[in-house]
Image (spheres, helix red, strand yellow):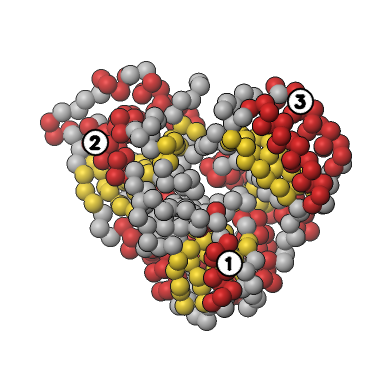
Amino acid sequence: MTRKLFGTDGVRGTANIEPMTAETALKLGMAAGNHFTRGDHRHMVVIGKDTRLSGYLLEPALTAGFISVGMDVMLLGPLPTPAVAMLTRSLRADLGVMISASHNPYQDNGIKIFSRDGYKIPDDVENEIESLITTGKIKDIRPTADDIGKAHRIDDAIGRYIVFCKNTFPDNLTLEGLKIILDCANGATYKVAPIIFTELGAEVTTINDHPNGMNINDNCGALHPEILAQKVVASKADVGLAFDGDGDRLVAVDERGNILTGDHIMTICAKALKECGMLRNNLVIATPMSNFGFRQALRKMNIAVEDADVGDRYVLKLMREKGAVFGGEDSGHIIFSNLHTTGDGIISALQLLANMQETKKKLSKLRGLLQLAPQKLLNITVSRKPPLSGIMPLQEAISRAETELTGNGRILVRYSGTQPICRVMVESMEQAVTDRIADSLAEIVRKTLA
């Protein structure tokens, strides 16, 4: 089916414009609630959100939708996306919902849905939910009397998630002696992250932890770690940790102010997992967005890499199919499936810090495990998204460039699944070659699709 609502990571768009309106959120709550209402027990959904202003618009609409089809709603308030996944399982809810547009600016919002096992729902379930809405069948589902649901607030949700995260850190280690700067992106980690790292013994300074509904991801967090890097150096801290708006991404900064992408963090953690015998099937799942140097680094460690489609849900899907316990994206979505059912920036940070404490190595030393190939990534705003395979000038230019690279680099041109953007990414062993090819491909995209 042609999907009108769901993209690569739930439903997403500009708040108060279709599909991110109260009306559609209401219908989505009704449709998702109906799909997950099976059996004769009392049904429950948990709902969390990040710090966007539009959360106040969408949360009550979703709540009304779920209640109207007989589901009880447990409201969590502002919490990271992985906390919603965890609490869905812990509370044995029928499903969980996170209201967030992740790394997007505040004017956007989104709705992500988790099944009772804590995993994001698959495409076929999204299709069924969307069909209930687009066909109008949801209008005929109307429980009455005591079959209507209720809404409650879970006051200790933050505490439950804090304990869950801390339990992923090795019992024989502490963070004592580490000076850490946290960048919470004025997002969903602003309350929980400082508590977790402080209680494990670190000296913690937090920045961008005063959300006002409109400053989430605003020149801060995992997408903009440059200010954090300056702060780490100025404060003589050991490490900086940057999360995105909904807390499922991690980007780190070493004591010298160098930024560690998801590829750096995955390289460090893959080596640690292999050395302790926990890297099942000696396999890491990545995506085509991971750097050419990342693949070379893991090859030197005799660790296999397989690519999933872009998107953390597809990484996890392939992990489960291949029996891998570890995978992620260069953007900072990193999944330890032996610890959680989804990417979690805080848990990823705890595993990175555990490796620092265990090896007694500075983060700059660990960062040296990966030498990045020069990369250029250009995001071009497009007015439409026809199949890229049908744009012959672009395909011919890509073919010529791949012949020039002769295996010493790679090219990736793809649409964003959540924004009107075409991404052009080029890597090679020479920066000048990388820049030239990326700029020429981007110009073709602009002329054709802008």
Spatial distance from mark 1 to mark 3, Cα to Cα? Answer: 41 Å
First-in-chain label (2 vs 1): 2
Farthest bottom residue in view:
177
Residue drawn 30% across and 37% down?
Answer: 62
Residue drawn 63% across and 27% down?
Answer: 449
Percent x, y of residue 435: 76, 46
Percent x, y of residue 361: 65, 76
Q: Nearer the viewer, mark 2 or mark 3?
A: 3
Q: Are marks 1 and 3 in contact (CB under 8 Å)?
A: no
Q: What type is the residue that disc 3 sits on? A: Pro
Q: What type is the residue that disc 2 sits on? A: Ala
Q: Which mark is residue 64?
A: 2
Q: What type is the residue that disc 1 sits on? A: Ala
Q: Residues within 10 Å of mark 1 (few under 14, many from 20)?
A: many
Percent x, y of residue 424: 68, 39
Judge from the rendering whether residue 393 lies leftward or rightward of residue 85; answer left or right: right
Q: Secondary structure at mark 3?
A: helix
Front residue of this view, candidates 17 and 154: 17
Q: Which quadrant of the figure contains the C terminus? A: top right
Spatial distance from mark 2 to mark 3, Cα to Cα? Answer: 50 Å
Judge from the rendering whether residue 158 lies leftward or rightward of residue 288; answer left or right: left
Is 213 placed above or below 36 here? below
Q: Answer yes or no: is residue 351 visible.
A: no
**Residue ID for mark 1:** 229
